[in-house]
């Protein structure tokens, strides 16, 4: 239900996300995973809002362009955007602070 909520949002459509996301139960997996631009797998322990948004970010970023690092700047920028929109300002600020404290780059220079 949560994935459908995200995929039905204006933000998701603006980010060009897949409208018919396939969510597998993650049975037999130790970690949550994005397989492609429209499939994620979530073991029971990984069915948390932040983890779901993390995997959905992979579907937006890493399967559309092969020249983007798996957890690079573009990924982090988009993940922050999703967290702010769906989890709120407090979660966004916590994540942004964590990024800064751990020297995670999330600012992307816009091309002219």
Image: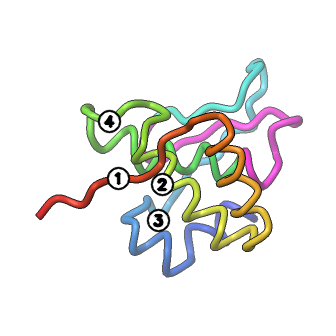
Q: CA distance from mark 3 to mark 4?
A: 22 Å
**Residue farthest along the bottom direction in this orientation:** 10
Dividing the picture into quadrants, the one containing residue 34 is: top right
Mark 1 or 4 closer to N-term?
A: 4
Q: Are marks 4 and 2 in contact (CB under 8 Å)?
A: no
Residue 19 badge? 3
Mark 4 or 2: in front is 2
Q: CA distance from mark 1 to mark 4?
A: 12 Å
Q: Are marks 1 and 4 in contact (CB under 8 Å)?
A: no
- What residue did someone put label 2 on? 77
Residue 17 point in image, percent of width and height: 43, 61
Q: Are marks 1 and 2 in contact (CB under 8 Å)?
A: yes
- What residue did someone put label 1 on? 108
Residue drawn at 50 percent across, 42 percent down? 58
Instruction: Specify the segment rendered in magenta.
Output: 36-51
Mark 1 or 4: in front is 1
Mark 3 or 4 closer to N-term?
A: 3
| Picture quarter with the C terminus | bottom left
**Rendered view: 106 above or below 103:** below
């Amino acid at each position: 239900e949560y994935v459908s909520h995200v995929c039905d949002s204006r933000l998701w459509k603006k980010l060009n996300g897949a409208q018919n996301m396939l969510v597998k139960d993650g049975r037999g997996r130790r970690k949550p995973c994005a397989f492609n631009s429209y499939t994620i797998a979530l073991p029971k322990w990984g069915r948390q809002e932040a983890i779901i948004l993390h995997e959905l970010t992979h579907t937006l970023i890493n399967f559309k362009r092969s020249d983007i690092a798996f957890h690079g700047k573009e990924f982090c920028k988009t993940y922050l955007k999703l967290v702010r929109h769906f989890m709120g300002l407090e979660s966004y600020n916590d994540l942004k602070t964590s990024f800064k404290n751990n020297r995670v780059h999330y600012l992307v220079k816009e091309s002219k």
